[in-house]
Image (cartoon, grey):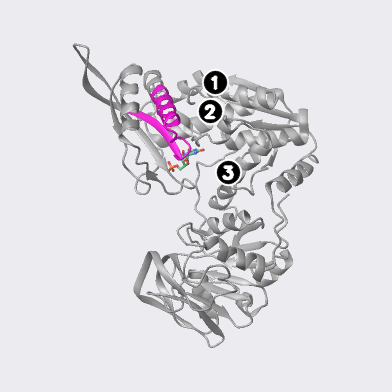
Amino acid sequence: MEPDLAGGIAVLDFGGQYAHLICRRVRGLGVYAALLPHQTTLAELEKLGVAGAILSGGPYSVYAPGAPTADPGIFAGELPILGICYGYQLMVKAHGGEVARAGRREYGRSRVRITEGGGLFKGVGGGGLEAWMSHSDSATKISPTMEVLAASDGSPYAAVRLSGGRQYGVQFHPEVSHTDMGETILANFVLDVCGSERKWSMQGFLQRSVEELSKLEGRVLCAVSGGVDSSVAAAILSRAVGQRLRCVFIDTGLLRAGEREKVEATLGRDLGLSVAFIDASERFLGGLKGASDPEQKRMVVGKTFAEVFEEFASTEGPFEHLAQGTLYPDVIESGRSSGPAAVIKTHHNVGGLPPGLSMHVVEPLRELYKDEVRELGALLGLPETALRRHPFPGPGLAVRVLGEVTGEKLAVCREASKIVEEVLEEAGAYSQAWQAFAYVGDDRVTGVLGDERKYGFQVTVKVVKSVDGMTADWSRLDPATLERISSRITNEVHGAVAVAYNLSSKPPATIEPQ
Ligand code: XMP
């Protein structure tokens, strides 16, 4: 099922924060790229038939004990390679050069002077470029077989080429948007040096996936939540297996306002899927009674979900397959692909299957990034409003109601969040935000309503910007928007008397309050 990497680009993962971004940028050029563990050997790459490899950056020093290494064959062979930051330093070292702690660290934008144009820098212009740097080590000596292509204030060897023109190294990050002409530099490597053809497209992916998925025998069960990933997974499966797909929506009582209606409209009306709705809210809320510890609440929600799901599967079954909307970063981050960047995030749906289920798992989106899933969803006819919905956590409002989950706090949280979303939509700011919601705990403050003192909830509003949810920054909303959110919440949400705005980034905070 996995797309063929032949003629595409392998991105070897040395743990750098931008490794995924390199993949996404190459795919954006129309060439398929996949992240592979840094230990992948030249023989393995040749067997896959890749046209070239990009060695990512990483947080290590090449001489540090235990620092990730690459197969020496890669540097000795003929396969085109581009080393970025740490990947570049490994290349320098492999060819007999030296790397040392830089006299001058470079973080952020740096001016890069191109000393030899053409090739990697074709179309970049002689004036040089502003490039994004993030390194404390630098190449201090390069082998005589390498030529310098560019320099910056902090590194005389900001870009190099091995004679023969198959291997390149850059100290800066062409994949980040802060580097001028970064896309041109990557395109020069991928299309010219590697000779990859622009054959990767979402239309092609859709066609191939439908062809493959239609070979599944038996019935497929898919839990939908109203979120982008499960909706797109259901839509593609429905195209492939038609009536053999059964969708189920479990109302946990912890969902956003109007979620069921949204699912009925987009999956039911727009795509013609039949969705079974199960109202299990009492069971979830009953299970959560008395639980105030965040981890305990997550556990209760996860366990109850598994039980309800299993009951549905056994009464409506048998189902041979279980579809999940797992995305590419989930697969990598949960350690199913073993790069040094692998961090286990237990809250993602990978590995979170009900233990008693014996169904074959189908993950039609496991090769895709979120923005690609949105593109695929559009091709499948999902409306734009459904595709740009913010992510929502599996445990739902249980992690946005601090302390014990009560009906009263749930109502405040749900209504206030709806207002936050509506105001951002009106202000044209919804799509720029990664997530936007309100949360509430047991803090009560004194207010005046009319002439009366009123002791009520303090609601906190959180709006963050993020690329992938791994890091996030609080949104600098304009004061008029904040003002509108605040006054609507105190006027319209029963029990709310004050509104605060959360000013914390991730790290050190996380996106969800619990
Ligand atoms: P945190 O709170 O860890 O969240 O900064 C990062 C992203 O993951 C989402 N999230 C979850 N998603 N189950 C999920 O399916 C969970 O338990 C969970 N916790 C957090 C969060 O909404 C954000 O987008």
Residue lying at 56% horizontally and 66% vertically, measured from the top left: 185
**Residue 149 makes an appearance in the image:** yes
In this view, 457 is above or below 374? above
Circle nearer the viewer, 3 or 2: 3
Q: Nearer the viewer, residue 478 or 279?
A: 478
Residue 453 placement, left or right of 351:
left
Q: Amino acid at mark 1?
A: Ala
Specify the amino acid type for callout 2. Thr
Q: Is the residue marked 3 within 8 Å of ligand 1, measured from its CB? A: no
Return the x and y of residue 249 as percentages of the image width and height.
60, 25
Query: Whole-Å distance between the Cαs marked 3 and 2?
Result: 17 Å
Measured as percent of width and height from the top left, residue 70 is found at: 57, 72
Percent across and percent down for residue 86 are 48, 69
* Vertical comparison of 124 with 468: above or below: below
* Residue 471 on the magenta segment: no
**Going by the image, does 363 lie left or right of 22?**
right
Q: Decide whether residue 429 is among the magenta residues.
A: yes
In the rendering, at what x and y percent does residue 195 appear? 69, 67
Establish if 117 lies above or below 129.
below
Upstream in sequence: badge 3 or badge 1: 1
Residue closer to the observer: 339 or 139: 139
Which one is closest to the eye, mark 1 or mark 2?
A: 1
Viewer can see residue 354: no
Query: Which range is magenta?
Result: 413-441
The residue carrying mark 2 is 304
Is label 1 in contact with label 2 (beta carbons under 8 Å)? Answer: yes
Instruction: Label 3: state its secondary structure.
Output: loop
Question: What amino acid type is highlighted by mark number 3?
Answer: Val
Alpha carbon of mark 1 to alpha carbon of mark 2: how far? Answer: 9 Å
- The residue carrying mark 1 is 280
Crowd rating for badge 1 (residues with CA inside 10 Å; few <14, some 14–19, many 20+): some
